[in-house]
Image: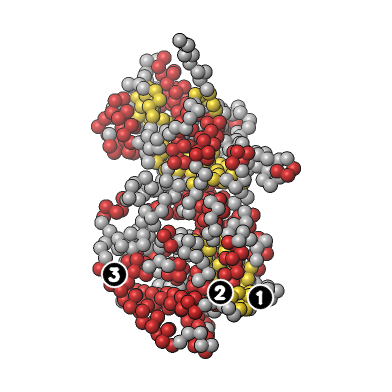
Amino acid sequence: MPQTTTKALTPGHAEITALSPTREQLLWMYDHMTLIREFEERLKWLVETGVPVGAVHYYTGQEACAVGVCAALEPTDWIASTHRGHGHCIAKGVEVHRMMAELYGKSTGTNRGKGGSMHITDVRVGMLGVNPIVGMGATHAVGAALSAKVRHTSQVAVAFFGEGAASSGALHEAMNLAAIWTLPVVFVCENNRYAQSTPVEYAVAASNISDRAAAYRMPGVTVDGQDVTAVWAAAAAAIGRARSGGGPSLIECKTYRYYGHHQGDDTRRYRTKEEEDAARERDCIKRFREQVLHDGSLEPEDLNAIDKKNKEKIDLAVIFAEQSPLPDPSELYTDVYVTEAR
Amino acid sequence: MKTETPAAVRELTFNQAINEALRLEMRRDPTIVILGEDIAGGAGLAHLGFVDSWGGSLRATKGLITEFGPERVLDTPIAEMGFVGAAVGAAMSGLRPIVEIMFVDLIGCCYDQIINQAAKMHYMMGGQLNLPLVIRTAYGTRGDGKRTYGGGAGAQHSQTLYSVLAHIPGLKVVVPSTAYNAKGLTISAIRDDGPVVILEHKFLGVAAKGHVPEDAYCVPIGRAEIVRPGGDITLCAIGRMTHVCLEAAESLAAEGIDAEIVDVLTLSPLDETTILDSVARTRRLIVVDEDTPVASMARDIAARVAEKAFDDLDAPVKTVTAPDTPVPFAAVLEAHYVPRPSQVISAVHELFGTGD
């Protein structure tokens, strides 16, 4: 199998060498990147036509991060996510119709309509929860990794977080704990440059967030978060290290969110159209298509079939959400305590 | 035939009882782990002969690392947000973690993990996962100005913050008062599939000594206990205040007032039935609480009784609580801070119109 070498963006870091993704992996990556894109674009349209789906934070633009990392995970591995979590959910295997139903507040949703966008969880596929208290999910990933270690399983936990969370105490406590206990956890920072409207240059006293890995005795690398195979290669190396008892790693993915912080945010208050246009030039899906068609690893009909399938999948997800029943008012009182038998 | 002689009644202190509860449960279930600051102590220094150097702030975890090893008894850095978060994550993924927060005053450092994460996971995730997490934490003020160790700790190491925990839906909050119920409630908390906070009074740790059976047993969460039956007035007490009320009840009995004492034991979910039944019999209620009064358990209990049993009452409900101030340092001030038997007796006299 051919080797691929991913150039780390940070000087002084070793290049990452990994096996090239197989055809199946490439198809999986394209499938999941486009499914996330379709989900978010449809959701945006629904929001703009007045469907009350609650507070949502679009993942559009960052697809290569979630997909590159999850492509290197096993189904039994865990992820902990952020408020901008739809991409992580889809990449880890949460079904889009149950996600959409959750956003509609329906009883068929992932959380029976009691969570919403900011709490989507599906433990059956190792998705430990979208978590909108910024930084906290990382501590939970550390706990899951501790669980794997104590129970002597080979599971790995991934903590997704943004560059905004990188300034939170929770992240630093989580990284320190993971390092002193040599836990199988990978910290994945999606640096999309803005914490709401606050730019990374202002809020983070480091040239690269990956530089902070050195402070916690773990490898750190910065990769192009718009290049799914680069993310995959870095993730595969870090996950392999974690699984074999080598402890935690930090990966920083340089990426960009195309839309505002949430559905009501006008980005023109803090960034220019030129900057946004330039970011879209480096779109992860566009670049992936160009690359795989150019090197002949996939054919146009492979990609077009996936596009068609995913559009239909989201059509069905919306229909499922619309037609699903609302929770019974009695649901207000269920599951406050765990003692109730289901 | 051999005559059966009664076995000597085995007595343990409050802390020894908790230690035994932890030990028995850890033997039973290998998924139980304990995390906290200096719960073993001297971490990583075994090669120098230092093992189990500390044993937790109240010594309730003493010796556990020797039996269960550092993989299950994890000393942590001073990072409450991190290690309580790790415990939440571990509880979501197959372990049954017990965390020790040295003093309840420190919950500010990890309040989000308790109130937004642990308490709400089960509900907001639609019941799809359990969260078998126990948080043990020490609380309370010295009160008598005498004991040196652990006393005189001032405003940030002496509080009784349980009302800010009981306020949160989804959390169970228990406050044991004796060695017996400390062991039983700890075991119940460990076996509960949701998050339970146990508040252990610093000055019951050694002082509350009593008979504790050797085997594992549960004291049910959500049930109050009538620790002294009486017909004239209900004294509803929390934690160490149960002992204050027992002392007050002795004096009251001498003057012909027979007080019933309800030890609340679980603040949330509260056993309203036992309290209301008692009030229906005695027709009078005083709630005695070491916490500050505003938005407190004392006033919550008073309000519930006023709402649900107003017609049973022959007199207004009263509360005896700490004042609405921080905990002071000087022993003379501290002694005035914590409710005392004399205050309970005065409150009873007021209700009976025999004020001093």
Q: Which residue lies furthest to the bottom in this view?
A: A294
The numbered mark 1 sits on a residue in which chain?
A
Compared with B266, A282 (above or below) is below
The amino acid type, in three-letter code, at marker 3 is Phe
Query: Could you say where residue A229 lies in the image, as x and y percent from the top left?
Result: 55, 77
The amino acid type, in three-letter code, at marker 2 is Val
The residue tagged with tag 2: helix, strand or loop? helix
Disc 3 target residue: A320
> Residue placed at 68% from the left, 76% from the top?
A11
Could you give the CA–CA distance between mark 1 and mark 2, rounded to whole angstroms? 13 Å
Looking at the picture, do discs 1 and 2 lie on one chain?
yes
Could you give the CA–CA distance between mark 1 and mark 3, rounded to whole angstroms? 46 Å
Could you give the CA–CA distance between mark 2 and mark 3, rounded to whole angstroms? 33 Å
Query: Could you say where residue B250 lies in the image, as x and y percent from the top left?
Result: 44, 18
Locate residue B65: give its quadrant: top right
A289 or A105: nearer the viewer:
A289
Numbered mark located on residue B151 in the image = none
Query: Could you say where residue B297 lies in the image, as x and y percent from the top left?
Result: 41, 39
> Residue placed at 45% from the left, 28% from the top?
B242
The residue tagged with tag 1: helix, strand or loop? loop
The numbered mark 2 sits on a residue in which chain?
A
Give left or right: position of A15 versus A75.
right
Disc 2 target residue: A231
Looking at the picture, do discs 1 and 3 lie on one chain?
yes
Confirm or deny contact between disc 1 and disc 2 (CB under 8 A).
Answer: no
> Residue placed at 67% from the left, 61% from the top?
A217
Disc 1 target residue: A15
| Colour mode of the rendering | secondary structure
Tell me which numbered mark, 1 or 3, is placed earlier along the sequence: 1
The amino acid type, in three-letter code, at marker 1 is Glu
Confirm or deny contact between disc 2 and disc 3 (CB under 8 A).
Answer: no
Q: How crowded is mark 1: few (under 14 residues within 10 Å), some or many (20 or more)?
A: some
